[in-house]
Amino acid sequence: MRRMSFDQAIEDAIIQAMLEDDRVFIMGEDVHTNRTNIMSRFSDRVIPTPISESAFLGTGVAAAMAGLRPIVELWMIDFVCVAYDALVNHAAKIYDFSGKKWSVPLVIRASCGAGIGDGGQHGQMLYGSIASIPGLKIVVPSNPSDAGRLILSAIQDNNTVIFLEHKLLSDHLLHYLGGSGRDTLEFNIPPDGIEGEVPDKWEPLELGKLNILKEGNDITLASLGVSVHRCMEAAREIEKEGISVEVLDLRSVVPLDIDGIFKSVEKTGKLLVVDEDYKQFGLSGEIAALLLEKGLKFEYGRVATEGTIPFSRILEDETLPNVERIRTQCKILLKK
Amino acid sequence: MESAKVEELYELMVRSRFFEELTKLLWEDGLISGELHIGIGEEATIAAVIANLTVGDAIACDHRGSPPFVMRGIDPVSILLEIMGYPGEESLCLGMGGHMHLFSKENLMESSGIVGASGPAATGFALAAKYKKTDNIAVSLSGEGSFNQGHMLESMNLAAVLNVPVLFVCKDNGWSITTRSCDLTGGNLVQRAKGFGIDGISLNGLDVEEVYHALKSIIPKMRKDKKPFFLHCIVTHREGHFTTDPLLHPMKTLKKYGGSMTKSFLTPKGAPIGKRIKSVGNILSSLVEFRKQTKTKNDPLNILRIKHKQKTQEFDKIDQKIDGEIGITLKKALLIYGKEVSK
């Protein structure tokens, strides 16, 4: 086992993939600045692009169709909106349109998430709306080991996978986008998310398999990304009151491990979904619907982002899922 | 140029400069979170535009909204509180927007953190102005990097075919975030505009008089003819793309990233050595090239001061006046902000 930061794990796994497979290359905004280590070793397999999201994402789609394995980078997933056509009408559709004869093995790598006071155009998750389109997979790792394994799974997958890395887990992004070099600023960074043990050699992780972070009997907390760590913190506090909490790290939005969630909720009878994406028409509602369709009877609650994410750090903290909100909702559910 | 006009333009620039220097300090002190995109080096271009506008003209800004908002005369206390993220009605946008998303409905000024978004926005404002049968125009402010963005180019075409008066201002500092724009841009931007049937010129955007004079004839013609225009202005960004720009502090950046880059460079398997040397050379030369922007000879305030040496005293007086005003702005903002923090 080795110890690595979240950034290092992703980079290390990408390097392994690039060594194993000549078809893998990186393309996107400022990649020569953001991926200096890979560029200094792999040179022209790192291709900086203009700020032309619709052009270079669409280019990535067709390059993947032509047999390459592009990792297309966006500074932030918010910017995929500029290239939504390439994603929704092309990357997601071509496999089906071609009679399942032509796939798009593309990875879209982008930062996601708020918590650094950067405003509502630079802090969204958007996985809910993307996940509503059939044909796209989305992974949201919460720690270095998962991040390295999941980026490898994404690269090896024969279809388009969106790989989202939360800004609070990436030292590099936190430095550039949050200005974390300033001693005067505090960020709510989960220590278990930014550094940890990783395997000596990366093996892909099967997509759509959740990770039970903590077993418990009274209530299930289901989440992914940074919110997983908020759940663990809340769970530790709630357990002091003699309540047994199960925490699930979903790891991916699509495919969603609904059977894993079902098993846990069948046991606890209560589910709280903690979701940094928007509350409306998203992951939290989808999970409830899927469980109901399976005939499960359970108590349900959710903590998610409501409304536009404010720039003000004070308002932002109140808007995002935080430990206090999770605890309060847990208590309400436990009383039911 | 008449003496009073020179002083007026200088004052507009200083107002923005001192305000942004203050925001930089507050950012360093951690009183402003997230990124901060500063427009120091753009003042001459923005001042020349603003000085040629009238009531009812719209401005669509990019992520560097402070200079146009301050110069347009919007209460600097409310802008500062917004940038500091104060969640109250004293802030320009209740603390919801931050520096990249400044909005003033009564002044028809809007902003966006999405590159190129000012193009369609200005086209819409211009369409509304023409529809309402006014003589107003709309200005799109954005960097040269945005002219590689689809929606910007599409809006240039749309403005041309709709015959609406959009002034596309291209503030060219040569860098698309941290990548040199010459490596990312095909052809010449003025020629590109002409390809859409839009008239355009390239000016020294660091010289406020040059841009002011040009616009003095261009804008009235736009009001009359209802036609778009492309204004390419060379500017600088002394403070980088954002205050955490890795190119701003080459030594610090090398310290942070140099070690792992060298290690990676020396690791076997990968590209041949010649290619690797070229890649590392490209990364390092970015750090050197970038420094050109920070030279004082490229500072628009200095350029005006040197051109009008005989007005040094008047300029100094303006500096003093604005310095005092900025002090009051800060005091007022901190008083309001402090109340919230102490809560």
Image (spheres, coloured by chain):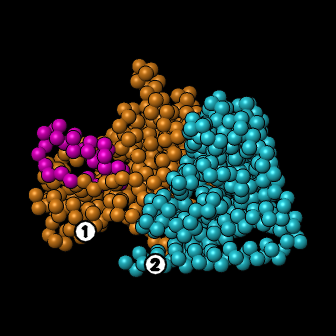
Chain colours: A orange, B cyan
- Residue depicted at 66% across the width and 39% down the height: B165
Residue A247's spot in the image, x, y percent? 25, 57
Viewer-nearest of discs 1 and 2 = 2
State the residue position of label 1: A236
Residue A144 visible within the image: no
Crowdedness near tag 1: few (<14), some (14–19) or many (≥20) residues, C-alpha within 10 Å: few
Q: Residue A90: image x %, image y %? A: 48, 29
Residue A166, compared with residue A90, is above or below; it is below
> Foreground residue, A30 or B204?
B204
User: Does dot 1 land on a helix, a strand or a loop?
Assistant: helix
Circles 1 and 2, Cβ within 8 Å, touching? The answer is no
Image point 21% across, 58% down: which residue?
A: A246
Please indicate whether residue B301 sits to the left or right of residue A48 in the image.
Answer: right
Q: Which residues are magenta?
A: A273-301
Q: CA distance from mark 1 to mark 2?
A: 34 Å
Q: Secondary structure at mark 2?
A: helix
Chain of the residue under the numbered disc 2 shown in the image: B
The answer to which of B244 and B134 lies nearer the viewer is B134
Give above or below for B312 relative to A228: below
| Residue type beneath disc 1 | Arg
Magenta stretch: residue A206 in it?
no
Residue A233 placement (x, y as % from top left): 29, 67
Q: Nearer the viewer, residue B257 or A180?
A: A180
Q: Dot 2 corresponds to which residue?
A: B338
Considering only vertical position in the picture, is B241 above or below B187?
below
